[in-house]
Image (tube, helix red, strand yellow):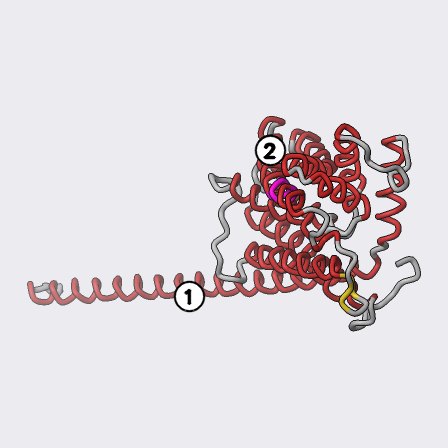
């Protein structure tokens, strides 16, 4: 029997055929793998978009719902005024402020008991940005609160100094009307409307829907982020119509002393965030910060928490101050509930 003898040319041809088959197989596998990856990416993007949509809807509904059921008489009088009267030991509405020491105590306590007023409650949303920085120790948690308090104090103190310099003629203390609408409440509507839009924009940015690169709160921009959030909380005083705040404002404005005005406004703003600080420290310390570590384990959890809190707070401010408030004076319509 004769066996076929492979010549040199035949061997080269067979080798080329084998090489071509290997290349084709490799290219096919790469293309298939790339298609699977692209399919997974598109599926992941679709799922992420759906989740972001429902998170947006839920946050807006929450903010609107709070604006509907919010009772200003309960939070302003029952909690704010009665609470301050209990702590200070005298009627905060009937007793005039007669000195600096009295003004100091009044400013901080009225800020504390005014935490849940409609002009400050949105500040509690700052718990989300605070929770994004992995404060796994008491020292780091206090540092984060320090940056927040710095931003709050700078804005509040600056406005207090300006208010004292201008004096009682400043629009926020004016009793003038535009039709039936008090000028001071028009200022409240404008200020809180703008702040609400800023919070909504920050919430959308946290979702990645504005094309804005949000600084990573866990890195070097954490302090800047917290100072900015604190500045927004301090700006709440610019539009605040809470009766006890107006009272301390009138005292500071009557002195025309910018240092005193800045000091009592800083105390008022620190009182506004005192409860927030206590809650955050409890969250950071209970279980050695287990909840915060759980949030930080996945960046998408932090983003969703930030987005939900900021969107709900911003929606509440816009709905309450720009729609519900004008409706009280016959401008537009807003649903009413018996207790509001």
Crowd around label 2: few <14 · some 14–19 · many ≥20 (10 Å) = some
User: Which numbered dot is residue 145?
Assistant: none
Q: Is residue 113 left or right of residue 192?
A: right
Q: Is residue 336 left or right of residue 260?
A: right
- Residues at marks 1 and 2 touching, judged by CB atoms closer than 8 Å: no
Q: Quadrant of the N terminus?
A: bottom left
Residue for point 39% across, 65% down: 32
User: Which numbered dot is residue 35?
Assistant: 1
Above or below — where is 9 with respect to 222? below
Crowd around label 1: few <14 · some 14–19 · many ≥20 (10 Å) = few
Decide which of 194, 224 is in the foreground and name it: 194
Query: Can you tell which quarter of the image residue 225 is in?
Result: top right
Q: Quadrant of the C terminus?
A: bottom right
Query: Which one is in front in this view, the residue at disc 1 or the one at disc 2?
Result: 2
- Percent coordinates x, y for residue 34 in the rendering: 39, 63
Does residue 193 show up magenta in the picture?
no
Residue for point 6% across, 63% down: 8
Tell me which segment is drawn in magenta.
Answer: 155-160
- Percent coordinates x, y for residue 181 in the rendering: 78, 65
Give SS at disc 2.
helix
Q: Is residue 145 left or right of residue 109?
A: left
Residue for point 13% across, 63% down: 3
Q: Main secondary structure of the magenta part?
A: helix
Residue on which disc 2 sits: 146
């Amino acid at each position: 029997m004769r066996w076929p003898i492979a010549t040199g040319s035949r061997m080269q041809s067979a080798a080329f055929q084998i090489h071509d088959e290997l290349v084709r197989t490799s290219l096919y596998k790469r293309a298939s793998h790339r298609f699977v990856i692209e399919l997974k990416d598109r599926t992941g993007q679709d799922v992420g978009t759906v989740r972001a949509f429902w998170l947006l809807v839920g946050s807006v509904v929450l903010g609107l719902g709070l604006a509907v059921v919010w009772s200003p008489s309960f939070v302003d009088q029952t909690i704010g005024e009665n609470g301050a009267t209990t702590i200070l030991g005298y009627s905060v509405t009937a007793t005039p402020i007669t000195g600096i020491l009295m003004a100091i105590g009044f400013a901080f306590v009225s800020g504390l008991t005014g935490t849940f007023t409609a002009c400050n409650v949105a500040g509690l949303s700052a718990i989300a940005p605070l929770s994004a920085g992995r404060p796994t120790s008491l020292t780091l948690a206090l540092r984060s609160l320090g940056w927040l308090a710095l931003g709050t104090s700078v804005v509040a103190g600056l406005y207090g100094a300006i208010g004292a310099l201008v004096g009682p003629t400043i629009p926020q203390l004016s009793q003038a009307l535009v039709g039936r609408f008090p000028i001071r409440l028009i200022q409240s509507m404008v200020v809180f409307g703008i702040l609400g839009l800023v919070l909504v924009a920050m919430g959308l940015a946290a979702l990645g829907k504005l094309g804005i690169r949000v600084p990573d709160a866990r890195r070097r921009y954490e302090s800047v982020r917290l100072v900015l959030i604190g500045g927004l909380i301090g700006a709440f005083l610019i539009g605040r119509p809470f009766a006890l705040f107006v009272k301390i404002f009138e005292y500071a404005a009557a002195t025309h002393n910018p240092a005193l005005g800045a000091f009592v406004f800083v105390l008022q703003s620190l009182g506004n965030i005192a409860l927030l600080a206590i809650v955050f420290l409890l969250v950071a310390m209970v279980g050695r910060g287990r909840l915060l570590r759980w949030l930080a384990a996945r960046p998408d959890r932090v983003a969703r928490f930030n987005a939900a809190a900021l969107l709900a707070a911003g929606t509440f401010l816009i709905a309450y101050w720009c729609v519900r408030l004008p409706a009280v004076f016959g401008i537009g319509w807003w649903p009413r509930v018996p207790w509001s």
